[in-house]
Image (cartoon, rainbow, N blue to C red):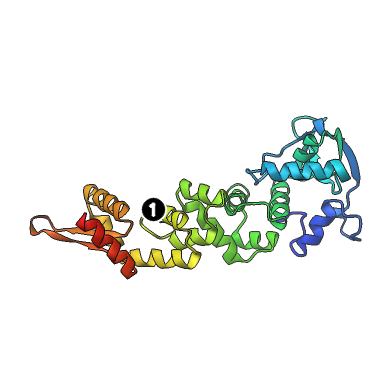
Amino acid sequence: MKTNIPKKGLGRGLSSLMGDTNINSTDNTVKSSEVTISIAALKPSPSQPRRLFDKNSINELAESIKSKGLVQPILVRPSKTDEDSYEIIAGERRWRAAQIAQLHKIPAVIKNLDDVEALEIAIIENIQRSDLSPIEEAAGYKRLIDNHGHTQEVLSEIVGKSRSHIANILRLLTLPQSIQDMISEGKISSGHARAIMNSAFPEQLAEKIINENLSVREAESLAKSRKSTVQKIKLKDPDTIDLEEKISEKLGLNVLINHRGKKGGYMKIEYKSLDQLELVSQKLKN
């Protein structure tokens, strides 16, 4: 699928779209004039991949705008539903801060962009500013794939990321919603998430990562240590699994119960140090 956005040198192309007058471009697709638009005439775009806006960060930006004004214009396109308004393509955070700073008008660059171009630019702009969480970035890519027929190879060219990066970040969307929320909130990193992605109990491991402040490498080791017992765990009845979890929580250590029906079974308690062994011994005595 072809668009008017340059597939190489996107930083330069985006700067031109954003109204950087220091760039001398011969590409007519990026030439735009800066205008001043009323705050009230600007509307957020449904294509905006960013969903979380940090209030403290926006308030800090608002203070800066009060002091020095809005230095960089936002990028907009004419509204499809209201001829007197404009849809924000890049710069919603600045628009929000400008409202707090009580500005009535702000500088903007108007471009006639279709839906695909609008979404591509919104994603690129946020990625370059490191404004998107991994989940927001992945969701933006998925929209381009599902709604506009982009391939991972095309996405790689558009956003200037490797195909492996695109593939890995899209995999985050296969995780349970609770873990996606942890990533969005910064409780765990995408590296932590990839480490536990193939686990039978990723949510349980994610909680352990947060509670014990584990590194990505430690998360990988944790996931591997449980991999050998995954098949057995899947075959256990819910009551046995529930008992394992309760004893594990009580002892603070990983507990494995292998119940063989009338033949009995065994319980395995894993410890990593002599101190942990001593702690288990004391709890058992009590």
Residue reaching furthest to the left? 262
Nearest the viewer among 228 and 245 is 245
Q: Quadrant of the C terminus?
A: bottom left
Q: Is residue 246 above or below residue 264?
A: above
- Kindly tell me whether residue 187 is visible in this rendering: yes
Q: Quadrant of the N terminus?
A: bottom right
Quadrant in the rendering for residue 259 = bottom left
| Residue at x 73% of width, y 47% of height | 118
Provide residue 175's location: percent of width, then percent of height: 46, 52
Number of marks in picture: 1
Relative placement, left or right, of 268 versus 194 is left
| Residue at x 47% of width, y 53% of height | 174
Nearest the viewer among 285 and 178 is 285
Nearest the viewer among 204 and 22 is 204
Three-letter amino acid code at disc 1? Gln
Quadrant in the rendering for residue 68 = top right
- Check disc 1 and report the residue beneath it: 204
Provide residue 10's location: percent of width, then percent of height: 76, 61
- Mark 1 nearby-residue class (10 Å; few <14, some 14–19, many ≥20): few
Provide residue 227's location: percent of width, then percent of height: 34, 65
| Residue at x 86% of width, y 48% of height | 71
Relative placement, left or right, of 265 versus 236 is left
Provide residue 92's location: percent of width, then percent of height: 74, 42
Nearest the viewer among 81 and 160 is 160
